[in-house]
Each structure stands twice: as C-alpha cells, then as structure tokens.
Amino acid sequence: QAVAGTSCRITETRKTIPGMRRLQKYAVRAGGGFNHRMGLYDAAMIKDTHISAVGGITDAVRTLREQISHMTRIEVECESLAQVEEAINAGADVVLLDNMSLQMMKEAVIQFGQRVTLEASGGISLETVADVASTGVHIVSVGSITYQVQGLAMHLEIG
C-alpha cells in the first residue's frame, strides 16, 4: 500500500532471524512485498569493501563475472552518481543506491533508470518508503520488515 500508484517494488533484505528465513521471506510475499534473495548463493553483490579490496568497480565486476555462472546477476552498491555510471558501464545488472538523498536518487533515475534496475537501500522504513518510491527507483529494500517484526499476541485456550 505504501508504494501504490508507482511501479516500485518493496523487498526485504537478507537479514533475518536465524532459522526463520524461509518463514520471514514467505511472510513478506504474503504481505504484498517481494523477496530480494534467499542467500549469498543466488545473486552476487559487490559492496564498498569489495570495491576497495579489488581497486574499483570495473575490476570488481570483471573479476566476479569471470568466476560466476552466466545465469548469476550482479548487483553493485554505489554511493555516488559517478559510481552508478561506472557500475553500469562495467556490466552490473542491478545498482544499489546506498544511503543516497532523495534528490540524488531522482537524478540517478533520470540519468540511468532506462539502462539498469535501480534499488534504493539504507535506512529506509515503511514510513519513508513512499517518498523513496516517488523518485522512480524500481526497487526499495526495507530491512526492518524482517528484522524488526513484532509478534502477534495469540493463544489457544481449551476449556
């Protein structure tokens, strides 16, 4: 409901309670959201630490692409528009706009939204997701929908 009227999808992140991942992922789908990935094995994500370790986004994507299946998608975490452009030119399938301002996200959508899937992430809650979706990003990951879940008070009495 929070992104109604947009083409944006809300996904969770991989952060789940140990032993509860499948149930939490199912709950997200049942609630109208989408799953990001089940584990580290079904997509490759290049984060800032990987970029630093390898020496840059282009080298990180190239090195990873040489070692993974042709079926595996690569997502690159970016903190600036210059990094977004480099990730796209390097062959990233998805670009994660990490902790970007709403204005920077809008600019990323204008410049690159037709070339690659753009995912917003970082400190986004269900209270702020509508504003993020209004920028035109394709996906918004909201980690709190799995790791800050409140239990439903239920009990069964047999009399």
Image (spheres, helix red, strand yellow):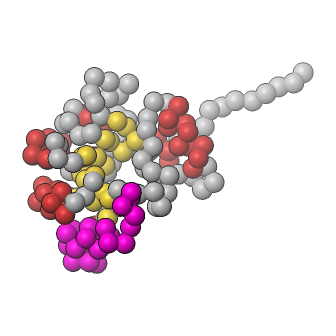
In front here: 120 or 75?
75
Residue displayed at 39% across by 57% down? 71
Q: Locate residue 92 relative to residue 152 in the image: left or right.
A: left
**Magenta-drawn stretch contains 52:** yes
Above or below, 120 against 126 in this view is below
* Percent x, y of residue 81: 12, 55
Residue displayed at 21% across by 48% down? 116
Q: Locate residue 78 relative to residue 65 in the image: left or right.
A: left
Above or below, 13 against 65 in this view is above
Residue 20 in sight from this viewpoint:
yes
Q: Locate residue 121 relative to residue 109 in the image: left or right.
A: right
In front here: 148 or 55?
55
* Percent x, y of residue 64: 32, 70
* Percent x, y of residue 126: 37, 35
* Percent x, y of residue 33: 44, 35
Residue 49 in sight from this viewpoint:
no
Residue displayed at 45% across by 51% down? 37
Residue displayed at 9% across by 46% down? 111
Above or below, 46 against 108 in this view is below
**Magenta-drawn stretch contains 9:** no
Magenta part of the chain: 50-72
Number of numbered discs: 0
Magenta residues: mostly which secondary structure?
helix
Q: Quadrant of the C terminus?
A: top right
